[in-house]
Image (spheres, grey):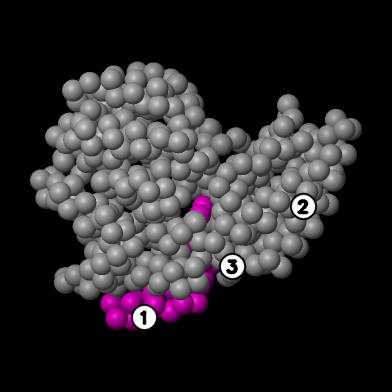
Amino acid sequence: MTGPELYRRAKKRIPGGTQLLSKRPEMFLPDEWPAYYSEARGVELVDLDGRRFVDMSFSAVGSCILGYADPDVNAAVKSAVDRGSMATLNCPEEAELADLLCELHPWAEMVRYTRCGGEAMAAAVRIARARSRKGTVVFCGYHGWQDWYLAANVGTSDALVGHLLPGLDPAGVPAQLAGTAIPFHYNDLAGFHAAVAKAGNDFGAVVMEPTRGVDPAPGFLETIRNVTRARGVPLVFDEVTAGWRLNTGGIHLRLAVTPDIAVFAKAISNGYPMSAIIGTGDTMQAAQETFVSSTYWTERIGPTAALATIRKHRALDAGPRLAAAGARVKKGWAEAARTAGLDITIAGMDPLARFTLNYPNAQAVRTLFTQEMLDLGYLASNSFYAMVAHTDEIIDRYLATVREVFALLKGVIEEGAVEKRLRGPVAHAGFYRLAQ
């Protein structure tokens, strides 16, 4: 059975077809994106039909920072499996990992674990609210699917514009949570102060990424830090995506602003389920005053994978390597677009790079780019998440193919034939909901 055939069958059994919105084939190339893999090693994937592709797209949505099936991480995990991944007693690796995380982040004193980013953020918000004894969260950016976050869209249709799902009807989120999550936009201090004022005396936490696509404006993070300290409110940094991309640890270490809580997932364990909530002692002790607990947060594989990943990341000084890979791709995109006469805008931090096609039918053009790159052996969209396994040679071969496809795109755009060239529907955009 081919990948597209299996996906059509899966949609009859799995609402939406996949467990992660970002992995739905409709987001890339409807009806043709491979959907499933049989093997993944380094930067290469093999689909169910035996076709090989070089992944120059999302790299497991940013979770495999070293590369697929990294031999050192896998060896550590296999040893953990052989010694027993779960028992009545606790695994010592969780204490060892806590020490390592606090060593890397000297401001932090205590650690709790979950197994994915969304639930880690939910636990962090629970701890922050327990610490402040107040309920309203002021937030910026995307932080997962849980009620605390989607509550921002209860009673309104545009609160999450620029954050997640514009116009999302948060079905299943209790109406009573309306007003408990108030958004502001990054680098908008006036918006931040307005959100704090709206929260009033119930202002209980600030949740935000320290940076993602753009650098913080001078004084932006410092002002938020000063306000939260003055009000006795925990500041939570969501580093689920940004962490470990430019350095070993949280990106906030490079920004010289320390939170009360920082949350890591994705890259922390190179594809194995693991997430960590680190924080100051007085903030984290609030976890004892509420209930944050789950059986599978005690298994052995996650901490073992995280220890192996972090140690290899530090030994390789992976941050600069990832940044260099992303910078090489961005430069190659720019040169290829200039040569072809293609109008694009390049953005994002280097290891999480992206380009925008500046055309009225940009989504159709992006879909065509993915279609043509797929035909030439690449999983590619308008974003590139760097892995250590992305060597210069791999990137240069990819960029040579991009130059070829950009030239094709320019010609098809001038002919007004983009949609005719597509073999299927136009891909869905961003986080917009899909019908199936």
In this rendering, position of residue 385 left or right of residue 268: right
Q: Nearer the viewer, residue 51 or 219?
A: 219
Report helix, strand or loop for mark 3.
loop
Please tell me which of labels 2 and 3 falls first in the chain.
Answer: 3
Is 344 placed above or below 277 here? above
Q: Nearer the viewer, residue 190 or 427?
A: 190
Residue type, label 3: Ala
Magenta-drawn segment:
61-84
Amino acid type for the residue under numbered disc 2:
Val
To which residue does mark 2 refer? Answer: 402
Q: Earlier in the sequence, mark 1 or mark 3?
A: 1
Location of residue 367 by image quarter? top right
Front disc: 1 or 2: 2
Whether residue 32 appears in this view of the structure is no
Q: Which mark is residue 79?
A: 1
Disc 1 element: helix
